[in-house]
Image (cartoon, helix red, strand yellow):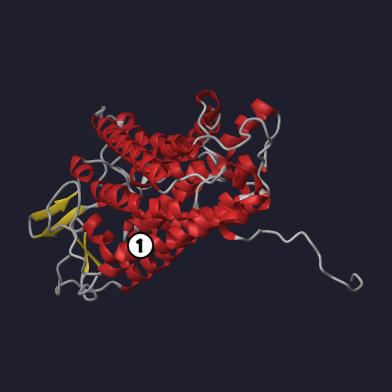
Amino acid sequence: MALMTETVLNSGDTAWMLASTALVLLMTPGLAFFYGGMVRTKSVLNMMMMSFITIGIVSVLWVIYGFELAFGSKANSPWYGNISFSGLGGMVNDFTNNGGIYPIPVLVFAAFQLMFAIITPALISGAIADRAKFVSWAVFVAIWSTIVYFPVAHWVFAFGNKVGDTVTGTGYLAGKGLEDFAGGTAVHINAGAAGLALAIVLGKRVGWRKEAMRPHSLPLVLLGSGLLWFGWFGFNAGSALAANGIAGLAFINTQVATAAALIGWLLVEKIRNGHATSLGAASGAVAGLVAITPACAFVAPWAAVVIGFFAGIFCALAVGLKYRFGFDDSLDVVGVHLVGGIWGSLAVGLFGTHVVNSIGIDGLFYGGGTELLVKQSLGVGLVALYSFVVTLILGFVIEKTIGFRIKVDEEVEGIDLNEHAETAYEMSSSSRGGSF
């Protein structure tokens, strides 16, 4: 990212990007609450710690080499950036150059993209709740981020370093014309496919389908989904890299799609089970957030409602597939993030229109034919296949070396006690005085 002295800093855009970066970071603690509420009492702390350790590991790796591997252009490769181990040194006065010059500091852009790199592996943790060694999870996060997320982020988000008419370092899918505004492929399909692979590697929880494994705290689930919803405005609208009309479009589409998905999920529950649950409302909202992520700046608000509504329906139906196929995706990472990400990415090929965004391509329903739909399908298939295969291999290697799954008796007793020597709730009382 070369120094562009003729570019003048836009303080308004920079302020918006700093705020968006903070919003996206908030999503990972929000995810910790969301996942933490969904597990049993004996697993709460471990579930939340899986998200927090991810923040620590990925943040450090991002500075050392992650940002360069994802967005570096010196290698001029469609598959990866470059690694110079510069530690982001010498970038303080540089402006962002990603397919063109943006009047915001490159370190702000790097910080913003870091938050995406953090939450993606954190999402995977929900697929293996209750049964993964904490140290093994940490090792997995470090390696997976390096060989899966950083390269895939380059494929999708790297639009190259543009100097004059010359562009270097464009990612493979970005160069092919994939439209993924904020991470339907790089984040959600990537995490969902990886979650499926790890669920296969670690196997089923003790007592799965025989014992009740209900969420221990639905208020925590709702709190987590609310924080995710709030932070997602930075996730999607912030991806405009400016405080402009595209950011406004992404913002409103994020809201209405999420609301529609919540309704769609509850409708399925009401028809199927006779009850609309709080867990369904929270899960439906997340499904809508996932689905609108790739499409938020390429579709009209009415289309966002349609995308969100069907996301709620599709994901509500998909979460039951784990029982049919026999894999224990503990917190429905596959049903929500993989299925929702696929639907949202393909929906761009149906509802996308240049009317709302001049750089967009018209989809099938706007007379554009199947061209965009084919490009979207390529992105979906390539990312899902790469993430699943590499994660499956990595998971088996960790399992066969240092071990990935805790012992059966430790799982039964509780992973919090055995991995962290703590419990989420102190049930005993040592009070010797009278009660108040």
Q: Which residue shows up at 68% across the image and 28% down it?
A: 273
- Viewer-side residue, 309 vs 191: 191
Count of number-bearing discs: 1
- Viewer-side residue, 385 vs 371: 385
Q: Position of residue 30 (x, y in %)?
A: 53, 57
Q: Which residue shows up at 55% across the image and 33% down it?
A: 316
Residue 228 visible, this orientation: yes
Q: Is residue 10 left or right of residue 57?
A: left
- Viewer-side residue, 416 vs 299: 416
Q: What is the quadrant of residue 112 in the picture?
A: bottom left
- Viewer-side residue, 142 vs 255: 142
Label 1, residues with CA under 10 Å away: few <14, some 14-19, many ≥20: many
Q: What is the quadrant of residue 131 in the picture?
A: top right
Q: Position of residue 150 (x, y in %)?
A: 29, 52
Q: Quadrant of the N terminus?
A: bottom left
Residue 303 visible, this orientation: no
In this view, which residue lies farthest toward the left? 165
Q: Say which residue label 1 marks.
A: 112
Q: Position of residue 348 (x, y in %)?
A: 34, 37
State whether residue 320 is above or below residue 17: above
In this view, which residue lies farthest toward the right? 434
Q: Is residue 5 left or right of residue 33?
A: left
Q: Is residue 365 left or right of residue 85?
A: right
Q: Quadrant of the C terminus?
A: bottom right
Q: Which residue shows up at 61% across the image and 53% down it?
A: 44
Circle 1: element type: helix
Q: Mark 1: which amino acid?
A: Phe
Q: What is the quadrant of residue 347 in the picture?
A: top left
Q: Position of residue 377 (x, y in %)?
A: 29, 32
